[in-house]
Image (tube, rainbow, N blue to C red):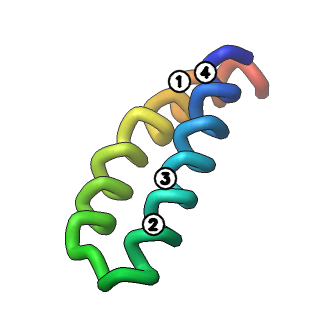
Amino acid sequence: MSVTIMVIAYSAAFYIMSVSEHERSKSRHQVPICLMTSLPIASFATLQLPLLV
């Protein structure tokens, strides 16, 4: 549950950051940040899947 809440908090912070960055200019750093942060989320989901099935 704590990992889920941390992911939600990070997603909200990244969304707020990307909206404010998008108003100024399109940031080319957003895509690599999204890709790098999706790795721990994907590994957590992969490791939790056998426990849920």
Report which residue position mark 3 lands on: 14
Report which residue position mark 1 lands on: 47
Mark 3 residue crowding within 10 angstroms, few (<14) / some (14–19) / many (20+):
some
Which of the two marks, 1 or 3, is nearer to us in this view? 3
Question: How far apart, in angstroms, are the residues tagged by discs 1 and 3?
Answer: 24 Å
Q: Quadrant of residue 48?
A: top right
Report which residue position mark 4 lands on: 3
Report which residue position mark 2 lands on: 18
Mark 1 residue crowding within 10 angstroms, few (<14) / some (14–19) / many (20+):
few
> 20 and 5: which one is in front?
20
Please name the amino acid that badge 1 sits on.
Answer: Leu
Which of the two marks, 2 or 4, is nearer to us in this view? 2
> 5 and 38: which one is in front?
5
The picture places residue 10, in percent across and down from the top left corner, at: 53, 39
At x 27% / y 75%, what residue is drawn? Answer: 27
Question: How far apart, in angstroms, are the residues tagged by discs 2 and 1?
Answer: 29 Å
Q: Secondary structure at mark 3?
A: helix
Q: Secondary structure at mark 4?
A: helix
Which of the two marks, 2 or 1, is nearer to us in this view? 2
At x 24% / y 60%, what residue is drawn? Answer: 32
Q: Is residue 41 above or below residue 17?
A: above
> 40 and 51: which one is in front?
40
Q: Quadrant of the N terminus?
A: top right
Question: How far apart, in angstroms, are the residues tagged by discs 3 and 4?
Answer: 16 Å
Answer yes or no: do the residues labelled 3 and 2 have beta carbons within 8 Å? yes
Please name the amino acid that badge 2 sits on.
Answer: Ser
Please name the amino acid that badge 3 sits on.
Answer: Phe
Q: Is residue 35 above or below residue 42?
A: below
Q: Quadrant of residue 8?
A: top right
Question: How far apart, in angstroms, are the residues tagged by discs 3 and 2?
Answer: 6 Å
Which numbered disc flags the more N-terminal residue, 2 or 1?
2
